Amino acid sequence: MSAPADRFDEVRRKWIARHQHTFIFQKRRAEMLARQIRDRVGELTGARVDPADDDVIHPLLMRPIKTPYAALDFAIVVVAAVLAPIGWPAGRAIYKGVIQLIPDTLRSYPIAAFMWASVVTGLPLVLLYDPDTTLAQTVLVPWVLGQLPATALAAGIYGILEGWLTVDGSRDWWPMRPPPAAESVDFGLEPDDLTLPGIFDTYPTPEPGERTPITRDSHERKNR
């Protein structure tokens, strides 16, 4: 199985490793990126890596909750699953689709665009919220409508968790890849073309003088 395309894996892995704190799911992300980097290096160089380096932390559902760190991870996942059961997987799907555009179309992941999109779509729900006596009007309807801003929020959060903050352009609205730099521009004008009109008077190039230098002996012979 070939390794995925390099999407700034090394700088992202370093950022995740340095900002993982006590979150085990972030440590797992850093290890998975490191495995992708080793696979890519092995394909390019033919080097054989240590098989022990391929061992990564098991997924959350496969890890026992025996430490406070594991309990914190589990609590975060449960809250996110209850609040955004549709927005969370939809945001993850959007993240997976957008990163396919990097680096050919986009130069980075647009975290700022998704974060502001969640604010724009969620602010009207807060301003227009009118609680009613029924449970459906008070809780169910806002919960369903809130899946739209939750989708954009989840897409932005995944960009942060995956280490895209360290890549230039992640704070832009839509960081397009700049066009390739042109080596030279041909305006169709030659710099030595004196037939073109200009603001300064020009004179024809003088005829070249004697190319053979006059020696001292020949000069003295003429004076005699």
Image (spheres, helix red, strand yellow):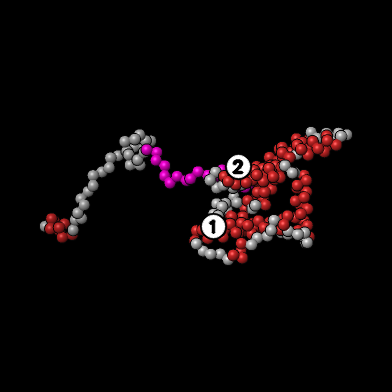
Q: Measured from the top left, where is residue 203 in percent x and y?
A: 30, 39
Left-right relation of 19 to 140: left
User: Left or right of 158: which side holds 51?
Assistant: left
Label 2, residues with CA under 10 Å away: few <14, some 14-19, many ≥20: some
Q: Residue beneath label 2, please?
A: 174
Quadrant showing the C terminus: bottom left
Q: Position of residue 28 (x, y in %)?
A: 67, 58
Whether residue 22 appears in this view of the structure is: yes
Q: Residue at x 76, y 52 (%)?
A: 76
> Looking at numbered disc 1 in the image, what kind of residue is underneath it?
Arg
Which one is in front, 25 or 191?
25
Q: Main secondary structure of the magenta part?
A: loop
The residue shown at (60%, 47%) is 99
Q: Dot 1: few (<14), some (14–19), or many (≥20) neighbours within 10 Å? A: some
Reading the image, the residue beneath label 1 is 40
Residue 66 x, y percent position in the rendering: 78, 61
Q: Is residue 111 left or right of residue 128?
A: left
Q: Is residue 216 magenta?
A: no
- On screen, residue 75 versus residue 3, left or right, reads right
| Mark toward the start of the polypeptide (1 vs 2) | 1
| Mark pair 1, 2: CA separation | 28 Å
Q: Residue drawn 67% across and 42% down?
A: 114
Q: Which residues are magenta?
A: 169-188
As drawn, 117 above or below 223 = above
Query: Which is nearer the eye, 23 or 186?
Result: 23
